[in-house]
């Protein structure tokens, strides 16, 4: 994942924007590309998209806040998405979530103080057969139990928020 | 290039379920081992990453053709043995065979497994059988023959008539007759026109559309070109939610290959018909699955639905006539054209023709994608195909229809599933999610779960949905936390009725269903929560007390060792006890106990 501080942001932004014609219907696609590359939409990214499409930045903001795929804040190094889709819910996903909340000391939507973990819930990762499921960055973990979660989080580094409690 | 022998193939499932348990590593491991072993060129199998095989619980799945041997839960240490025994010597490795959940026996091929026996595959005809990234595989199985037939032998009117004859109804939820939708749009004299494939699949607990696109993208493309020809559209869009990265990638590659072979683009197959197809990635909003919100989203606007009196077949995308159908609907089109509408309408029930793909998940032994003829009973689906309830607990309900569907109780297990019977049972077909629940599922919590979901997903445009759902959520939260008051259940019914009547779009109109259907079928459970402050399933923590039955407890110590709160004590072989002051009501013990010794007080 790259940082918006990179010197060549202007060039990077340009390369994303110019993949698309200057039509409003490509706004979402551009935003998705920025989101994917940097993991959130910075003010500067929003401004650039708006300028490129010649529409007010407010329009881009309204899209960014309406659609769940976008974040306006920087996330942790590891993004934990705990599935609370129906299949996972009936297989006790809330217990998994609580265990992680306890271990990291953060709630869904939060990021640990050291910037290591962000916690989110999602509705269905499409792997319901393995419920309950979570995904950390791109790695899937299925058939979870509280015990398994502890083991898995250990793999992602000594710290996390775990020690800070 | 047909060889004398039937081609030997090894199919490694790389569907979402199997990928999550290492399908990709197995695929690569097999590839490299077979190359390294330099197996005789004529018998060298073709290894393919294939879409969903269905039986996700047992992944990763590997299947050998033409012998038709299937292995499950294959892991890297098994590969050497597989290559030596099965690939080289064509012997079966017994321990890797699938166990039939129903009979408990190991079976050699998919066909022998009860999970597959009652299935009939039309929309999923190629899924798991072909490499989705290779158009030749699709062509080998009659791919694009329906398109050629349409372009050179049928005029738009006969295409529509054939689809009407099939009785096909939309698989995305409402079950609107597909042929009629096409006819209404064809009738409008206004161009350009558009066709759209709805692959937003927002229902939590459902992955049918994902399975089809990842496993057999060309069937959707072919269906769309045929539909476009029927209504005289020249541009189409596939709207896929962005989280489905593999589906997006697969569809883009399939479109590229179809263009290269002139199944898409200008002057398709030399017929003079032009049609181009684009992928649009959705932004993750449940309401964008609704047709008018989806169109707004394609236009680059906020995905808010509009009132239904303006019909999309007349004024849809960019206010032009538009046909929007679900992934599975499109995938059904090519077989209907090739085999005829009459054939299709011979399958299913009086008013629901053909098959339906369900994602069977929750507390059931076999989970995965299943495709069955309309009219199959819930009992067959859950007990024969699904193999029954996990840990042989008691079946309590099955939830169908996604967040706006309902819960069907055990008394109705013999219901024959089709569009109309599910609606009559206060639920609906929806897109095909089927979530099985057992005695450890609390129906009030389930209702709250859906209302929570829908409150978050309500776009906020109309107040009955925005405000009504919030109030319902508050009441349900109260009931689940022990603060429920007499009259709350009636109040839920009243607000639910109002939201259902007054909301603008399908989201609001159906949102109260989970609450109303659970109140109707599980009223006592609500009463227990409100009046006796007790959650019989042991899910709502403030209302739960777990106790150990001293008679049934054998003192095995399993619960004690696994209790995260260290709240259980007892000597080996003596009955254990739970220290209520430490118990966090997580329910771990009740899930683990093999002697049914733990109960909810
Ligand atoms: C809130 C809401 C969400 C919907 N989500 C989906 C969806 O994810 N996929 C889908 O195919 N249809 C969805 N629909 C139904 C569509 O509006 C539309 O009826 C359907 O895609 C039409 O295709 P069909 O006739 O082939 O079923 C949804 C409807 C509503 C009201
Ligand atoms: S409900 Fe969790 S993966 Fe589908």
Image (spheres, coloured by chain):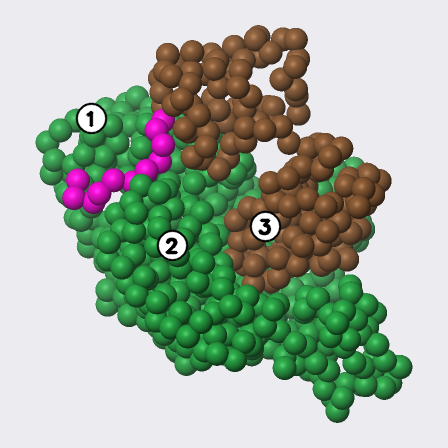
Q: CA distance from mark 1 to mark 3?
A: 41 Å
Secondary structure at badge 3 equals strand
- Residue B101 position, x and y percent, is 61, 71
Q: Mark 3 = which residue? A: A83
Q: Is residue B554 left or right of residue B527?
A: right
Q: Residue under mark 1: which chain is it in?
A: B
Q: Which sits earlier in the primary sequence, circle 2 or circle 1?
A: 1
Residue at figure coordinates x 17%, y 40% from the top left: B310
Choose top left, top right, bottom left or bottom right for residue B107. bottom right
Q: Is residue B303 magenta?
A: yes
Chain of the residue where label 2 is placed in the rendered structure: B
- Decide whether residue B336 is among the magenta residues: no
* Disc 1: which residue: B192
Instruction: Give me the residue at 44% from left, 25% from top.
Output: A61
Q: Which dot, 1 or 3, sits closer to the camera?
A: 3
Q: Nearer the viewer, residue B304 or B345?
A: B304
Mark 3 residue CB less than 8 A from any atom of ligand 2: yes
Q: Residue at x 27, y 59 (%)?
A: B498
Is B224 placed above or below B104 here? above
Check the rendered structure and report the hue given to chain A.
brown
**Span shown in magenta:** B300-310
Residue underneath mark 2 = B469
């Amino acid at each position: 994942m790259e940082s918006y501080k990179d010197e060549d942001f202007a060039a990077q932004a340009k390369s994303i924007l110019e993949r698309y014609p200057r039509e409003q219907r490509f706004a979402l696609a551009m935003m998705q590309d920025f989101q994917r590359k940097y993991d959130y939409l910075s003010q500067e990214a929003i401004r650039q998209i708006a300028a490129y499409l010649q529409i007010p930045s407010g329009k881009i903001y309204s899209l960014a806040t309406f659609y769940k795929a976008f974040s306006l804040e920087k996330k942790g190094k590891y993004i934990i998405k705990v599935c609370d889709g129906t299949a996972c819910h009936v297989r006790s996903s809330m217990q998994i979530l609580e265990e992680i909340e306890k271990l990291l000391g953060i709630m869904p939507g939060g990021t640990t103080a050291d910037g290591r973990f962000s916690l989110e819930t999602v509705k269905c990762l499409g792997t319901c057969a393995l419920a309950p499921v979570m995904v950390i960055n791109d790695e899937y973990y299925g058939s979870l139990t509280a015990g398994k979660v502890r083991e898995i989080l250990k793999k992602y580094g000594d710290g996390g928020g775990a020690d800070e409690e | 290039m047909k060889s004398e022998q039937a081609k030997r193939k090894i199919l490694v499932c790389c569907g979402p379920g199997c990928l999550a348990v290492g399908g990709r590593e197995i695929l690569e491991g097999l590839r490299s081992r077979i190359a390294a072993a330099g197996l005789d060129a004529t018998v060298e199998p073709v290894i393919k990453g294939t879409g969903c095989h269905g039986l996700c619980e047992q992944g990763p799945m590997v299947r050998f053709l033409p012998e038709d041997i299937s292995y499950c839960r294959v892991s890297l240490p098994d590969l050497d043995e597989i290559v030596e025994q099965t690939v080289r010597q064509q012997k079966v490795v017994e321990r890797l065979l699938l166990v039939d959940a129903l009979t408990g026996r190991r079976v050699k091929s998919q066909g022998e497994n009860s999970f597959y026996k009652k299935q009939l595959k039309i929309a999923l005809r190629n899924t798991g059988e072909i490499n989705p990234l290779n158009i030749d595989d699709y062509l080998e199985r009659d791919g694009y023959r329906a398109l050629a037939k349409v372009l050179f032998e049928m005029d738009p009117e006969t295409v529509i008539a054939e689809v009407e004859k099939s009785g096909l109804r939309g698989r995305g939820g409402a079950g609107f007759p597909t042929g009629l939708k096409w006819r209404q749009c064809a009738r409008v004299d206004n161009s350009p026109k558009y066709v759209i494939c709805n692959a937003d699949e927002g229902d939590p607990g459902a992955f049918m559309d994902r399975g089809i696109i990842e496993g057999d993208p060309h069937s959707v493309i072919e269906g769309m070109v045929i539909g476009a020809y029927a209504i005289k559209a020249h541009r189409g869009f596939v709207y896929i939610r962005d989280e489905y990265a593999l589906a997006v990638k697969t569809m883009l590659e399939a479109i590229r290959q179809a263009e290269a072979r002139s199944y898409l683009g200008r002057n398709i197959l030399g017929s003079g018909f032009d049609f181009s197809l684009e992928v649009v990635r959705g932004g993750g909003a449940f309401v964008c699955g609704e047709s008018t919100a989806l169109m707004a989203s394609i236009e680059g606007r906020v995905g808010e639905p509009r009132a239904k009196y303006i019909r999309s077949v007349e004024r849809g995308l960019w206010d032009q006539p538009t046909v929007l159908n679900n992934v599975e609907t499109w995938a059904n089109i090519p077989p209907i054209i090739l085999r005829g509408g009459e054939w299709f309408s011979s399958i299913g029930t009086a008013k629901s023709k053909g098959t339906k793909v369900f994602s069977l998940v929750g507390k059931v032994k076999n989970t995965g994608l299943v495709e069955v003829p309309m009219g199959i009973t819930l009992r067959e689906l859950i007990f024969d195909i699904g193999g029954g309830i996990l840990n042989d607990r008691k079946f309590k309900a099955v939830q169908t229809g996604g967040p706006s569907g309902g819960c069907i109780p055990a008394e109705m297990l013999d219901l024959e599933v089709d569009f109309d019977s599910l609606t009559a049972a206060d639920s609906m077909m929806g897109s095909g999610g089927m979530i099985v629940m057992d005695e450890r599922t609390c129906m009030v919590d389930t209702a709250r779960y859906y209302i929570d979901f829908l409150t978050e997903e309500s776009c906020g445009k109309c107040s009955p949905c925005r405000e009504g759902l919030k109030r319902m959520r508050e009441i349900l939260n109260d009931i689940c936390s022990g603060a429920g008051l007499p009259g709350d259940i009636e109040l839920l019914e009243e607000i639910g009725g109002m939201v259902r009547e007054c909301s603008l779009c399908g989201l609001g109109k159906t949102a109260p269903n989970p609450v109303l259907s659970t109140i109707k079928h599980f009223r006592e459970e609500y009463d227990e929560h409100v009046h006796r402050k007790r959650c019989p399933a042991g899910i709502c923590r403030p209302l739960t007390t777990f106790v150990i039955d001293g008679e049934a407890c054998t003192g095995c110590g399993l619960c004690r060792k696994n209790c995260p709160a260290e709240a259980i004590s007892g000597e080996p072989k003596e009955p254990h006890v739970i220290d209520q002051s430490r118990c966090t009501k997580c329910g771990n013990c009740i899930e683990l106990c093999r002697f049914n010794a733990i109960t909810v007080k």
